[in-house]
Image (tube, rainbow, N blue to C red):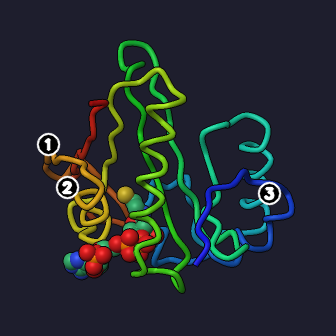
């Protein structure tokens, strides 16, 4: 299996739409990841990130753009931190793909950005994502009770982080 992180381009529109339009993914994401995921959403995302965002990548497996992963550098007094986010198309789950990509992104972040901490905020019930982060050396720093409200339900917010060593 060939796994790489690549820039999003307009050629990826079809793959993005195909894999991102999935309620089982959206339910774990902030509402900026819509459901249903329509063609205009895919177009808006790719146009935005291909021009402005150097730190968001397509997860590319054997040539298919089947997921997304990226770092969001913070501002102001949080400027030494970046938030990590990711998702993967359902047919590819459970093969270690995102764990591999998180490792790549952590290395990329500490090499290319002026940051000392990378954090992620999975929902308390998102055991798979927590497993990924733990496998990649992230440490659970905090559990905030019922701070997330998604699809009519409250969820705990977990803060996992890895520091520049
Ligand atoms: C979370 C997600 C990115 C994981 O991607 P993935 O490539 O399938 O993850 P990996 O295969 O690298 O690792 C998953 C790990 O979780 C484990 N796992 C999965 N479900 C589990 C469960 N219910 N309980 C315990 N462990 C579980 C797997 O066994 C695997 O660990 P292992 O390699 O030690 O066996 C993917 O499922 C996804 O896109 N989910 C929807 C969106 C999302 O949750 N994004 C993250 C928001 S913070």
Residue 62 percent location from the top left of the image: 67, 76
Q: Is residue 40 above or below residue 79?
A: below
**Of the numbered discs in the image, which one, if any, rests on residue 142?**
1
**Of the numbered discs in the image, which one, if any, rests on residue 156?**
2
- Residue at image position (43%, 63%) is 100
Q: Is residue 47 above or below residue 28?
A: above
Separation of residues labelled 3 and 2 (CA atoms): 32 Å
Q: Which quadrant of the render holds ligand 1?
A: bottom left
Separation of residues labelled 3 and 1 (CA atoms): 36 Å
Q: Is residue 22 above or below residue 109?
A: below
Mark 3, Cα crowd under 10 Å, few <14 / some 14-19 / many 20+, is: some
First of labels 3, 2 by sequence position: 3
- 1 with respect to 150 (left or right): right
Residue 152 percent location from the top left of the image: 33, 65
Q: Is residue 86 visible?
A: yes
Name the mark nearer the viewer: 3 or 1.
1
Q: Quadrant of the N terminus?
A: bottom right
Q: Is residue 141 above or below residue 64?
A: above
Instruction: Tell which residue pokes out farthest to the bottom in this image.
Output: 91
**Of the numbered discs in the image, which one, if any, rests on residue 85?**
none
- Residue at image position (26%, 41%) is 161
**Of the numbered discs in the image, which one, if any, rests on residue 43?**
3
């Amino acid at each position: 299996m060939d796994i790489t992180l690549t820039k999003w381009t307009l050629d990826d529109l079809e793959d993005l739409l195909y894999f991102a339009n999935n309620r089982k993914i959206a339910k774990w994401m902030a509402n900026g990841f819509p459901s249903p995921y329509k063609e205009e959403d895919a177009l808006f995302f790719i146009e935005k990130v291909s021009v402005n965002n150097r730190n968001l990548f397509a997860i590319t497996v054997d040539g298919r753009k089947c997921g997304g992963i990226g770092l969001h550098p913070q501002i102001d007094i949080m400027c030494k931190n970046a938030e990590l986010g990711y998702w993967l198309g359902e047919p590819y789950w459970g093969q270690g793909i995102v764990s591999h990509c998180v490792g790549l992104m952590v290395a990329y972040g500490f090499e290319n950005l002026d940051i000392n901490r990378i954090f992620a905020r999975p929902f308390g019930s998102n055991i798979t994502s927590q497993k990924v982060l733990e496998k990649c050396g992230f440490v659970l720093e905090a559990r905030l009770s019922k701070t997330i409200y998604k699809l009519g339900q409250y969820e705990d917010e977990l803060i996992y982080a890895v520091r520049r060593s």
